Image: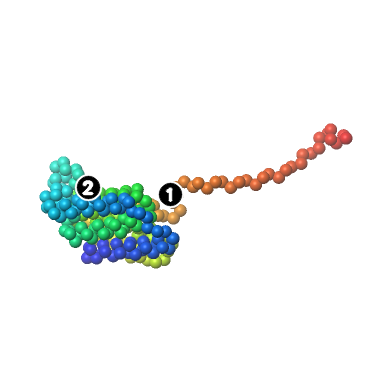
Amino acid sequence: MEWILISIALTAAAAGGVQYLRGSGRRLALPGMTLVLAAVTAVVSILGNLNPDILAALGRDRDALLGGQWWRLVTPLLVQDGGWAGTLFNLVALLIVGTLAETLYGRGVLLGVYAAAGIVSEIAGYTILQNQGFAGNSVADLGLTALCLVTYVVGTQPLPRVLGVVGLLAGATLIVTANLHGIGFAVGAVAGLVLALPGRERQPSTTLPAARPPRPATCSAPSRTDRSH
């Protein structure tokens, strides 16, 4: 059930993104930061799949974290506990939703939401939602997915809105069923609301103030000297 819901959310984000960009007359940007994230994750994940010791050294381990291995708050996002199939799925998902998020908001927002969704999910995985796997970047992928879905729903295009609602319902199910992926999804949804709400000024306006119309000329009353002539 978990992967069905994740697949629905990802598919809705991908399909909605194509329609959203087409409707707004935009094209996909070159996803430089997405490609960097995917490349680094791919290299480390492949090494982890080939060498179980690397996977064990980087995966989520509460005792090791409490013992001083602080890097385990981040490194579980670089390796996969789903084998080769899980690695491929998570990397393809990152390339899809990462490209859309980077096109919509730029590399800074992409990196910020990806990191926030991933790290908050790891904190939850170490505390309130333990024993739900031990590695994988899918929680961060779901953060980007929710960011895109909220953007579609806040927008004005009907079809992307519908797809956005479908994807958000799938993500909401992950949240209410206490699934770890729902944490990353919630982080991305909040970021989407902050960034995409209508009327929010994302940059200061550069519009020049309107010029004032010229004041009409006024005739002054004649002076006593003028009246005497």
Horizontally, residue 221 falls left or right of residue 15, namely right
The dot on residue 211 is none
Query: Which residue is at a point 16% across and 43% down the rendered structure image?
Result: 69
Is residue 169 in view from this perspective? Answer: no
For the N terminus, the quadrant is: bottom left
Q: Residues within 10 Å of mark 1 (few under 14, many from 20)?
A: few
Work out which residue is located at the far top of the displayed protein and give it.
225
For the C terminus, the quadrant is: top right
- Which label's residue is closer to the chain start, 1 or 2? 2
Vertical placement of residue 122 versus 23, above or below: above
Query: Which residue is at a point 19% across and 61% down the rendered structure image?
Result: 85
Q: Secondary structure at mark 1?
A: loop
The image shows residue 83 at horizontal and vertical percentages of 16, 58
Q: Which residue is mark 2?
A: 74
Q: Nearer the viewer, residue 208 or 123?
A: 208
Q: Secondary structure at mark 2?
A: loop
Query: Which residue is at a point 74% across and 42% down the rendered structure image?
Result: 218
Horizontally, residue 127 falls left or right of residue 163, namely left
Query: Which residue is at a point 19% across and 51% down the rendered structure image?
Result: 44
Residue 153 sits in which quadrant?
Answer: bottom left
The image shows residue 173 at horizontal and vertical percentages of 27, 62
**Measured Cα–Cα span from mark 1 to mark 2:** 30 Å
Q: Which residue is mark 1?
A: 202
Q: Amino acid at mark 2?
A: Val
Is residue 22 in view from this perspective? Answer: yes
The image shows residue 10 at horizontal and vertical percentages of 29, 62
Work out which residue is located at the far right of the displayed protein and give it.
229
The image shows residue 97 at horizontal and vertical percentages of 31, 58
Horizontally, residue 139 falls left or right of residue 195, namely left
